[in-house]
Image (cartoon, rainbow, N blue to C red):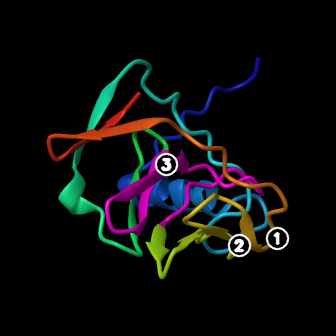
Amino acid sequence: MGTTRRVVLTGTAVSAISLVGACGSSGEPGGSAPQSPAAPPTGPVVLGPSADVAVHSGKVYTTEQVVVTQPVAGSFKAFTSICTHKQCQVGSVENDQIICPCHGSRYSAVDGSVLKGPATLPLAPKTITVAAGKITLD
């Protein structure tokens, strides 16, 4: 008859396992394996005040999986925030460029096109409405 062993993971062991999973299978910092993002909400969702999105910059709304940019004062654009290279979530918008922290892909804040790889496909556009100082994902 065999013996049954129980393994109890402590906080340190659980943290180590979580870190390994966050880095992806190759152990690259920032992750090389796709993160399995939860499904974004459906239907209209108020993202927040339009004042949160600076000109020539943007804001990533992680839960809704959308990035909103303002390349020109008063002109807002929105795209999926999931990088087309390895499906990591983009991390920031600087100088009209949407930046993915996983492998350095950069996208245009104007039209979502690829400015720098390894990504080869653009970010898909999303529909938003900006009214009464609020941004709504349609």
Disc on the earlier residue, 3 or 1: 3
| Mark 3 vs mark 1: in front | 3
Asked whether the residues under the numbered discs 3 and 2 touch, taking CB atoms below 8 Å apart as contact, a structural biologist would say no
Q: What label sits on residue 108 in the rendered view?
A: none
| Mark 3 vs mark 2: in front | 3
Can residue 75 be found in the magenta stretch?
yes
Q: Disc 3 marks which residue?
A: 78
Place residue 125 in its image quadrant. top right
Can residue 97 be found in the magenta stretch?
no
Disc on the earlier residue, 3 or 2: 3
Q: Amino acid at mark 3?
A: Ala
Asked whether the residues under the numbered discs 3 and 1 touch, taking CB atoms below 8 Å apart as contact, a structural biologist would say no
Q: How crowded is the residue under tag 2: few (<14 C-alpha within 10 Å), some, or many (20+)? A: some
The residue at 55%/65% (across/down) is 109
The residue at 37%/54% (across/down) is 11
The residue at 62%/68% (across/down) is 108
Q: Amino acid at mark 1?
A: Pro
Disc on the earlier residue, 1 or 2: 2
Q: Disc 2 marks which residue?
A: 103
Q: Nearest the camera: 133 or 49?
A: 133
Q: Nearest the camera: 80 or 73?
A: 73
Q: How crowded is the residue under tag 3: few (<14 C-alpha within 10 Å), some, or many (20+)? A: many
Q: CA distance from mark 3 to mark 2?
A: 22 Å
* Span highlighted in magenta in the image: 66-91
Place residue 20 in its image quadrant. bottom right
Q: Amino acid at mark 2?
A: His
Q: Disc 1 marks which residue?
A: 118
Q: Nearest the camera: 15 or 80?
A: 80
